[in-house]
Image: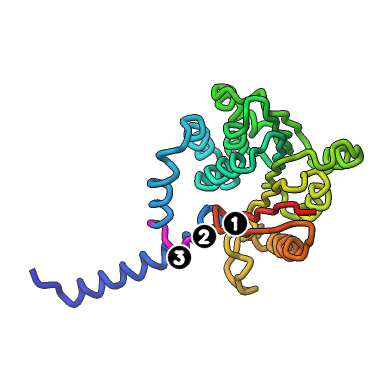
Amino acid sequence: MATTTAEATKTSTNNVEDKQSQNLRHQEVGHKSLLQSDDLYQYILETSVYPREPESMKELREVTAKHPWNIMTTSADEGQFLNMLIKLVNAKNTMEIGVYTGYSLLATALALPDDGKILAMDVNRENYELGLPIIEKAGVAHKIDFREGPALPVLDQLVADEKNHGTYDFIFVDADKDNYINYHKRLIDLVKVGGVIGYDNTLWNGSVVAAPDAPMRKYVRYYRDFVLELNKALAADPRIEICMLPVGDGITICRRIS
């Protein structure tokens, strides 16, 4: 059947709308990939991530997806990355600031040896307890020392005792962006030389290169300057080597060298 001019115009319009819709999805804060193609991101998940995702992580990811604040969770590809990174550096004593329901925490716990430890801090125990039954079922809850409340007072106590200096192999930070600089000032003393600190959300939904008048959620715009400040500080810090990766919402890996 021949295509009419009206049908062709409608098809063209639909294609444009589909492309605009995809672009808008990438502007949304909740989109956990900086890739310009949803199909490509889905390919990565279905080819590399989901087939290897431990059953407990899959269960926790699905439980978290039903939570009203699910935007806060670590993406599945980033969880896989963290799990492998911890194994590569042979981490044993670790720390996590910002836990939410515990998806990244579970990724870490599964990667650690049986006597590995995670000092985990979050201001909301209720969210952590949502994932705790799954963590317990996975047999790794004994590795976790969860502390409810702000992380800075705990870090100050740790830093005050020089016995804690250089004792952490791996630290992951996914918390209040306005305190990232304050965290770094303390964590650099606690991580060992050769150890790794990972700062999450360092590309902040791509807003770090957005024009001042670009469309952004209010809190994206608010925290954007703090993320930019952190990125500038990490790039200038001679005590670390850094690698910024477009995994999830951007993660900067810092290896302490002095």
Does dot 3 land on a helix, a strand or a loop?
helix
Q: Give the mark nearer the N terminus: 2 vs 1.
A: 2
Q: Position of residue 15 (x, y in %)?
A: 31, 68
Contact? badges 2 and 1 (CB < 8 Å): yes
Residue in the foreground of this view, choosing between 202 and 2? 202
Mark drawn on residue 34: 2
Q: Give the mark nearer the N terminus: 2 vs 3.
A: 3
Against 239, residue 153 (above or below) is above
Would residue 69 be seen by someone viewing this image from the given angle?
A: no
Amino acid type, mark 1: Gly
Q: CA distance from mark 3 to mark 1?
A: 18 Å
> Label 3 belongs to which residue?
23
> Label 1 belongs to which residue?
250
Q: Quadrant of the C terminus?
A: bottom right
Q: CA distance from mark 2 to mark 3?
A: 11 Å
- Crowdedness of circle 3 by 10 Å Cα count: few (<14), some, many (20+)? some
Q: Position of residue 24 (x, y in %)?
A: 47, 63
Mark drawn on residue 210: none
Q: Give the mark nearer the N terminus: 3 vs 1.
A: 3
Quadrant of res 156: top right
Residue in the foreground of this view, choosing between 233 and 123? 233
Residue that appears at 72% across and 50% down:
176
Contact? badges 3 and 1 (CB < 8 Å): no
**Stretch of the chain drawn in magenta:** 35-39
Quadrant of res 166: top right
Does dot 2 land on a helix, a strand or a loop?
loop
